[in-house]
Image (cartoon, helix red, strand yellow):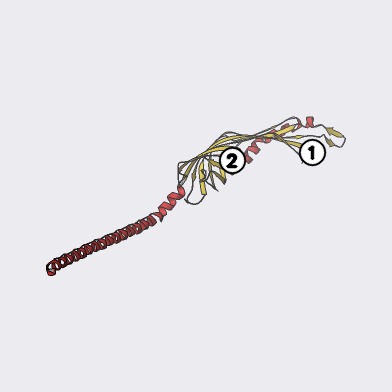
């Protein structure tokens, strides 16, 4: 048997086999390298997109001045509130509605009733009783202006309809008066009553702190202002020995003509609806 004839083909087959395996290995290595590059490119792209997304998000999260103002106004616009008032014109209830971030509309009703409030004083050295009665009811229609979006300072204006604005004071001696041997009993002396009556429309202006419609559920406010009530109608009546005092009604009316402004101080507790 010729060994060369056998060995040579085997060697040829082995060389081609090694060559084919080497080529196959090279091809796989190239594909693996290409795959690695693709993965790197995908990772880089994703990282770039993530960075861009973070940048966009950060840009969106950074608020502008308008956004700050808008956010400060969120939860407040278009809302209403009810409030309880304690003021120089009595106790009251109120409804307020937000128009925009600078304006609130308000409707307020105040009531003050005092019946037979008695106080003992000395008048001309003689003990007397002073009895007071007050009956006040007015309805306010107001517009509240807040110059600063992020502060609670406010200016208030409007008018009031005074449906009842009456008050009277009665003065009467409660003990006999002695002039030497003369003794005059209280019922013989008589009494005197001064009455005041305001009614009709009264312009109002004021300023204060605290929004009519609070941003939170509950808000507190204080307000100071004045009503222009005009000159009141004054009456003066007297009985018995004091009857001649009633002749001074005209002078009393003239003296009261200067009291055209009525001061107003109010504390307010509001509940947002």
Check the image and report above or below for 67 versus 82. below
Whichever of callouts 1 and 2 sits on the residue coming sooner in the sequence is: 2
Q: Which mark is residue 85?
A: 2
Return the x and y of residue 259 as percentages of the image width and height.
61, 42
* Observer-nearest of 84 and 115: 84
* Observer-nearest of 230 and 84: 84
Quadrant of res 24: bottom left
Q: How crowded is mark 1: few (under 14 residues within 10 Å), some or many (20 or more)?
A: some
Return the x and y of residue 91 as percentages of the image width and height.
61, 38
Would residue 142 be found to the left or right of residue 26 on screen?
Answer: right
Determine whether the residue tagged by mark 1 lies in a helix, strand or loop: strand
| Name of the residue lying farthest toward the bottom | 4
Return the x and y of residue 250 as percentages of the image width and height.
64, 36
Determine whether the residue tagged by mark 2 lies in a helix, strand or loop: strand
Would residue 253 be found to the left or right of residue 63 on screen?
Answer: right
Residue appearing at x 31%, y 61% in the figure: 44
* Observer-nearest of 182 and 160: 160
**Quadrant holding the N terminus:** bottom left
Would residue 219 be found to the left or right of residue 117 on screen?
Answer: left
Foreground mark, 1 or 2, reads 2
Check the image and report above or below for 142 versus 238. below
Quadrant of res 42: bottom left
Q: Residues within 10 Å of mark 2 (few under 14, many from 20)?
A: many
Q: Is residue 141 visible?
A: no
**Residue denoted by label 1:** 127
Return the x and y of residue 225 as percentages of the image width and height.
56, 45
Q: Distance between the residues labelled 1 and 2?
A: 37 Å
Residue appearing at x 25%, y 63% in the figure: 29
Check the image and report above or below for 56 versus 140. below
Quadrant of res 229: top right
């Amino acid at each position: 048997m010729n060994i060369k004839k056998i060995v040579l083909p085997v060697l040829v087959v082995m060389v081609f086999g090694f060559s084919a395996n080497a080529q196959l290995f090279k091809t796989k290595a190239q594909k693996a390298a290409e795959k690695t590059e693709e993965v790197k490119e995908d990772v880089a792209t994703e990282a770039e997109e993530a960075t861009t997304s973070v940048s966009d998000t950060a840009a969106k999260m950074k608020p502008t001045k308008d956004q700050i103002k808008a956010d400060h106004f969120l939860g407040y616009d278009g809302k209403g509130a009810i409030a309880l008032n304690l003021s120089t014109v009595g106790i009251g209830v109120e409804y307020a509605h937000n128009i925009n971030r600078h304006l609130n509309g308000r409707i307020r009703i105040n009531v003050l009733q005092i019946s037979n409030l008695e106080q003992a004083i000395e008048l001309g050295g003689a003990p007397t009783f002073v009895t007071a009665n007050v009956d006040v009811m007015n309805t306010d229609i107001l517009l509240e202006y807040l110059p600063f979006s992020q502060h609670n300072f406010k200016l208030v204006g409007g008018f009031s309809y005074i449906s009842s604005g009456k008050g009277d004071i009665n003065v009467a001696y409660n003990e006999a008066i002695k002039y030497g041997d003369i003794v005059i009993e209280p019922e013989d002396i008589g009494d005197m009553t001064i009455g005041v009556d305001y009614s009709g429309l009264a312009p109002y202006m004021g300023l204060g702190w605290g929004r009519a419609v609070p941003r939170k559920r509950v808000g507190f406010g204080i307000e100071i202002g004045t009503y222009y009530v005009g000159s009141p109608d004054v009456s003066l009546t007297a009985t018995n020995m004091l009857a001649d005092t009633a002749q001074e009604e005209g002078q009393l009316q003239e003296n009261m003509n200067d009291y055209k402004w009525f001061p107003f101080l109010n504390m307010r507790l509001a509940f947002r609806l």
